[in-house]
Structure formats: structure tokens, C-alpha cells
Image (cartoon, rainbow, N blue to C red):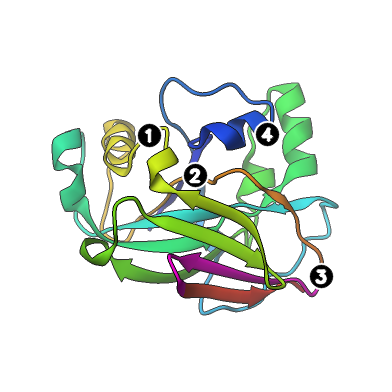
């Protein structure tokens, strides 16, 4: 099982971090040790003082695919879920300044809390989603604002990496990212459905 994450897939998020808007999908990976399931708590790591939340829609791949044509990409997932791509922003900032990889800022243990999934064919187009912290909405997004659609992302990734059943694709975060602190309660929604609910420790 692989966790593949798309970066800079919403224009306003790219702008808020002063990043250029990409001409093609940007992706990176997390190990399976990044996953947190079943609403278990997220423990702040001791190596960062600036861990940011990034709420994202997540695709669950359910068949083997390589070099998938974009027009067929919708056949490779049938569920959409919600997750958080935690980022050690202070470590990422240093890595970017030095031109180094981001893995220790993005792929650390517990950096990918994963919520529930809904059947894709039951969801509206566009899909709306949001993150609440302590009852206040801090991020909200819609697939209408995606730079690269789900199908485009799947087709692009599969040019380079074979997709297998059970792989997860985090599809990018909208604007509004920011730091979390101990005892924060994070709740992730698709539409009005609460699918992720956990506490920062």
C-alpha cells in the first residue's frame, strides 16, 4: 500500500505559501507508518515547532493500473474519503531553501490521519469538504477549484508508478492551512458528513 500526495493542487493554497502554480501535478509519498486510523490521536513530534494541518480528499485505488488513460481513470476508484496531510512547516521551509527533499517534513510517523470513505457515485459534483478545529471552520474546499482533476492526477501518477489496490491518493489541500496545538480537536467533513474526528496530543 502506497500513500501518494498531490501538492499545490488549489491555486489559493499555492499563493498563500508563495509557491508557483504548477503546470503539471506535483506529487510526493508517505510511508504506511504515516497513517493514523480509527480517529486515534495525533501526537505532536518533538522535532518540529510548527506542524500545520492540511485537509484533503483521498481516493482509494481499487484495481491495478499502469499508464492509465485519463478518460478511463474514473474506473480505478469508487470511494472518496477525507484525511489530513500534516506538515512540519519549519522543516519544510529549511528543506526548500536548501533544495532538499521534503520527506522528513511530510512523511513522518503519524502525519496522515485517515477518516472514513463514501461511495463516489453518491457524491455531488463538485464535492465540498472542510476542516473544523475546536468547532470553528478553518479550511473549506470544493473540487470545482482543483487545478488537476482526480482523473488527471491518476493518469499522471500512473505514468511513473504502478497503482495497486489499496493505494491512497491525497489530492491536495485548499487555502487556510495553519498550525495545530496540543488538545486541538480536528473534525473533517465531506459535505455535512463527519468522517474524521481526532485530538492532538
Q: Quadrant of residue 62?
A: bottom left
154 in relation to 137, above or below: above
Q: Which residue is mark 3?
A: 182
User: Which residue is rendered at x = 34% and y = 50% of the image?
Assistant: 126
What's the distance in space between the residues labelled 2 and 4, CA to CA?
Answer: 14 Å
**Mark 1 and mark 2 in contact (Cβ < 8 Å)?**
yes
**Mark 4 and mark 2 in contact (Cβ < 8 Å)?**
no
SS type, badge 3: loop
Q: Position of residue 161 (x, y in %)?
A: 32, 38
Of residues 141 and 87, the one drawn nearer to the viewer in this rendering:
141
39 in relation to 125, above or below: below
Q: Is residue 59 left or right of residue 41?
A: left
What's the distance in space between the residues labelled 3 and 4, CA to CA?
Answer: 24 Å
- Magenta range is 183-193
User: Which residue is rendered at x = 37% and y = 55% of the image?
Assistant: 127
Q: Nearer the viewer, mark 3 or mark 1?
A: 1
Q: Is residue 105 left or right of residue 201?
A: left
Amino acid at each position: 500500500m502506497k500513500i501518494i500526495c498531490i501538492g499545490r493542487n488549489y491555486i489559493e493554497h499555492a499563493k498563500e505559501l508563495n509557491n508557483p502554480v504548477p503546470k503539471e501535478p506535483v506529487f510526493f509519498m508517505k510511508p504506511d507508518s504515516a497513517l493514523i486510523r480509527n480517529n486515534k490521536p495525533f501526537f505532536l513530534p518533538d522535532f518540529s515547532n510548527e506542524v500545520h494541518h492540511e485537509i484533503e480528499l483521498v481516493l482509494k485505488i481499487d484495481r491495478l493500473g499502469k499508464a492509465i488513460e485519463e478518460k478511463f481513470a474514473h474506473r480505478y476508484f469508487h470511494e472518496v474519503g477525507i484525511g489530513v496531510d500534516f506538515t512540519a512547516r519549519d522543516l519544510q521551509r529549511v528543506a526548500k531553501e536548501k533544495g532538499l527533499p521534503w520527506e522528513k517534513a511530510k512523511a513522518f510517523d503519524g502525519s496522515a490521519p485517515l477518516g472514513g470513505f463514501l461511495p463516489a457515485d453518491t457524491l455531488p459534483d463538485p464535492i465540498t469538504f472542510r476542516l473544523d478545529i475546536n468547532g470553528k471552520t478553518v479550511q473549506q474546499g470544493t473540487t470545482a477549484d482543483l487545478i488537476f482533476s482526480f482523473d488527471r492526477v491518476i493518469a499522471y501518477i500512473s505514468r511513473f508508478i504502478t497503482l495497486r489496490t489499496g493505494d491512497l491518493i491525497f489530492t491536495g489541500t485548499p487555502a487556510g492551512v495553519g498550525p495545530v496545538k496540543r488538545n486541538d480537536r480536528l473534525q473533517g467533513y465531506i459535505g455535512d458528513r463527519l468522517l474524521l474526528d481526532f485530538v492532538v496530543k
